[in-house]
Amino acid sequence: MRPVLLNPLFAPVTSLPGVGPKQDKLFRYLLGHDETPRLLDLLFHLPVSVIDRRARPKIRDAMPGTVVTLEVTVDRHRPAPPGRSRAPHLVYASDDTGDVVLTYFRAQPGYVEKLLPVGAKRYVSGTAQMFDGTLQIVHPDRVIDEAGLAKLSGIDPVYPLTEGLALGSLRRAVAQALQKLPELPEWISSEISRRCNFSSWAEALHRVHVPTELTDILPQGPFWSRLAFDELLAGQLALALVRAQLRRPAGSRHAGDGHLRNKIIDALPYALTASQQQAAAAISEDLRQPVRMLRLLQGDVGSGKTVVALLAAAAVAEAGKQTALMAPTEILARQHIKTIVPLAERAGLQVAILTGREKGKERRDIVARLAGGDIDLLVGTHAVIQDDVVFKALALAVVDEQHRFGVRERLALTAKGEAVDVLVLSATPIPRTLVLTYFGDMDVSELREKPAGRQPIDTRAVPDSRLNEVIDAVGRALKSGKLVYWICPLVEESETIDHLTDAEQRFESLKQRFGDKVGLVHGKMRGSDKDKVMAQFAAGEINLLVATTVVEVGVDVPAATIMVIENAERFGLAQLHQLRGRIGRGSEASTCLLLYREPLGEMSAARLRVIRETTDGFRIAEEDLKLRGEGDVLGTRQSGLPGYRIARSDIHAQLITQARDEALRILKDNPKLTGKRGEALRCLLYLFERDEALPLIGAG
Ligand code: ADP
Ligand code: MG
């Protein structure tokens, strides 16, 4: 149960005076919430910059273009003449050095007169401008008297906003939320506080929202850093709690005698690469240990991760236990099944698939067989974490392309068994700090070699002014019997509609040119329709497949040897690499054409250069890092970490390791989080909504 102490922070923003339904909607949008955000969501929305109002020049010395706070006496008003509401209401004011005009457009009648009474002394803050040789401030941000000046901090925070939301109303809401801050027990050890120069949590929040120095709002400054550390510590503690609590019951092992694995290896139509063998051996060893496995298997697209995962599942089946393999998309889940089933059959391993598509009786059968222990390996999408999906003895969770799943989903899956081992498959090498952030300590296996017999991919960049030549070349390739992908970009969620018409239009025009063997697959299609098209493509009934990025992950049609990527400049490096990984999977040479729109920006040009130069995913990931900074590797904006609101991977990388070390130390000294410090740490976990692991250790 959440400590009542925290309740004020979990109150909805609409409980604040002046925040009504309209603001609710804007705040939801701004903070990316489906429901009404809580006060803490507002408080974790940190400023991006400040307006410095501390400059207090005389009128004569005010610099046009800068923000100034002037001390003036109001001389006279010139309201807009009747019938000319477009004309501004002008206020003439002065000090002993000169005059200033304060300009108000569309002012409510009487409003300006009340704000600036003739003869009164006022402090007026805003951006100074020169107009017709006179100093002017249009719509001053602040007009205050002596008492107001005493309260003016002089530095105003500026927040990321959304259309329709005024900075002032966001500031007011934040200020009100700050009033409600409860006093919380300190969860950070005094040693760390001293070393990192941290203030209390409440002071840190106050200082980033009500800065008294320009540097107070910097992410690398002590206040923001304190908040980032809190968030990271909560994350690391949650991960460490899960891991520490899940030792296997004595005597239970998750790997058997090897008889199923040997059958699979015998049935393989190829030899495992050396790194596949190493990875499989490391996993088998982990499965035998009394401590839970947490291993990341990194390997380029096409490096053969699926068979390694299958061998792990076989080892688990030998011990009479079950495996779940969760993939981010239905296409990918079906792809795995296709690779796995023929091999599994030879070994007598029972495999089933469960996605959103299996319904009614079919689904009931699968769920029943799973609960009865008749299924050794369940492959699926996030449908496998639904509540009524119960395993008889889940021992291994394989999570493919992990960064599409949150920590919560991974926990939901591992909660379906006891001391479940975790194997994460990733085609994009993840920087160490990110591994730490999402998994805590984790072992890593890499598949560095490509399976033998792979042909290189010839990659070229072509301006879209040469589209017709490209289409001609595609025509020639189709005539000689080749299979071709034509990729159209999906840029932003909000552009989904546009991009669909893009892909659809391209599909129509290519169909007109090349006839009925042109197909279309996109994310808005029903799963079964997608599969049908993919199957037709694999069988060659479709030879030109227009696709959005749904083919990005995992899809395997080895006979496809040509890929055209439209608007290649709009894709990220990792995504281009993933896409291109769909070709070059067979024994024939492949070609990838990157169509780009001119003029090409510097970053886009650099990306296309890298992708032309190499097909090594590890190198591409490194270049990607260089080009856009670590936080962006997972495709997030700025350098935020997905699932984290305050911590940023570029600036707080150091804090990630410190938080990890601190979390491990805490659990060593106080594994059940008891006593005063334990209580404080529980508070922290609730505050950052990482409390899902707390039931594992019981009440404090
Ligand atoms: P990944 O998931 O790493 O992108 P897959 O596991 O889908 O790659 O493997 C890609 C293709 O390579 C599959 O068709 C698979 O059968 C094949 N493959 C896997 N390992 C080898 C190997 N050692 N030699 C030849 N082909 C292999
Ligand atoms: Mg794969």
Image: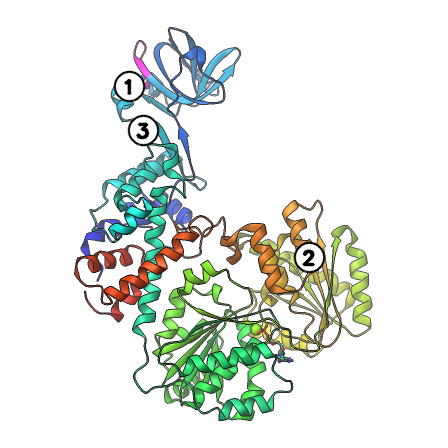
Q: What stretch is highlighted in magenta?
A: 115-122
- Label 1: which residue? 145
Task: Residue at 38%, 41% (x, y): give it.
Answer: 221
Q: Is mark 1 on a helix, strand or loop?
A: loop
Q: Mark 2 or mark 3: name the one nearer the start of the chain.
A: 3
Residue 139, image x and y in percent? 42, 23
Side of 505 where 168 appears, left or right? left
| Residue 412, horizontal then vertical, whole percent | 37, 71
Q: Distance between the residues labelled 2 and 3?
A: 52 Å
The numbered mark at residue 566 is 2
| Above/below status of 446 relative to 661 | below
Q: Is mark 2 on a helix, strand or loop?
A: loop
For the residue pair 480 and 65, the one nearer the viewer reads as 65
Q: What element carries label 3?
A: loop
Q: How far apart are marks 1 and 3 (CA)?
A: 14 Å
* Amino acid on which the number 2 mark rests in the picture: Glu
Q: Residue at x 64, y 65 (%)?
A: 616
Per the model, the C-alpha gap separating discs 2 and 1 is 60 Å
* Camera-side residue of 187 and 413: 187
Q: Name the residue under label 3.
A: 153
Instruction: Name the magenta segment's main secondary structure.
Output: loop
Q: Closer to the observer: label 1 or label 3?
A: 3
- Seen from this angle, which residue lies furthest left? 675
Given contact means CB atoms under 8 Å apart, are the residues at marks 1 and 3 in contact? Answer: no
Q: Does the magenta stretch include residue 530?
A: no
Quadrant, the C terminus? bottom left
Q: Which of 75 and 88 is in front in this view?
A: 75
Circles 2 and 3: CB distance less than 8 Å? no
Quarter of the picture holding the N terminus: bottom left
Q: In this view, does 396 lie to the left or right of 568?
A: left
**Mark sitting earlier along the chain (1/3):** 1
